[in-house]
Amino acid sequence: MRATNKKIVICLTGLTACGKSTAARRLAEKYGLEYVSGGTALRELAFKMGYKGKDKGWWETSEGMRFLEQRLSDPKFDKQIDAQLLAWAEQGNVVLDSWTMPWLSKRGFKIWLEVSPEERAKRLANRDGISEKEAVRIIMEKDGKTKRIYESLYRFKLGEDYSPFDLILDSESLTSDEVFDTLSLVIDRLVLKRGSMRL
């Protein structure tokens, strides 16, 4: 059952290991919305092209990094997926887990999750069972390449330009439950216009 008859769009983003995918999935489930991930769509496209690997944490593997390099040299992959995401945004009733939609789509309530590189490295290390030193290296490489892709393709600076966002949540010291609860309060009040908001 959907939360409202209004066709709502929520765009959620942030840099690697900030918790955006977990929060986006939970919000979609709570409000009866579709969950669509740009990263998942790109990964599935890579698999169709012959890339190999696991599902979880794939972008941080050597295969994922190799596909990032290919995307740097050829924009067709990102343009294909972004066209699909824009169609989802136009359809509405969706939570978009995407690095590009806050800039490319005029629709939606747009949220940025802010977490320091050090904390993101700790989370990545715990998630993938690697050392924090390795996690720092991976995050620096992935963030750098991802920022270059979007600056080259769309001229926005990921992680530096916050102008599209309706909410910037510093989730450095928040648990995933606290992030979810906070975002739910904001969405209830500002998107669905339900009751009062007390943070």
Image: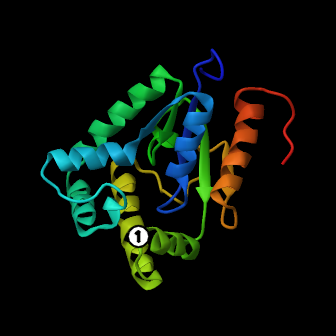
Residue at the (79%, 27%) spot, across then down: 194
Residue hosting label 1: 128
Residue at the (38%, 43%) spot, across then down: 38
The image shows residue 141, relative to residue 19, as above or below, that is below
Q: Position of residue 185 (x, y in %)?
A: 76, 40
Is residue 124 visible in the rendered image? The answer is yes
Quarter residue 36 falls in: top left
Q: Position of residue 110 (x, y in %)?
A: 60, 40
Residue at the (63%, 17%) spot, across then down: 6
Residue reaching furthest to the left: 50
Q: Is residue 69 left or right of residue 173?
A: left
Is residue 163 visible in the rendered image? The answer is no
Q: Amino acid at mark 1?
A: Asp
Quarter residue 57 falls in: bottom left
Q: Is residue 186 left or right of residue 70?
A: right
The image shows residue 176, relative to residue 77, as above or below, that is below
Q: Is residue 65 left or right of residue 184?
A: left
Q: Position of residue 65 (x, y in %)?
A: 27, 65
Q: Position of residue 127 (x, y in %)?
A: 46, 67
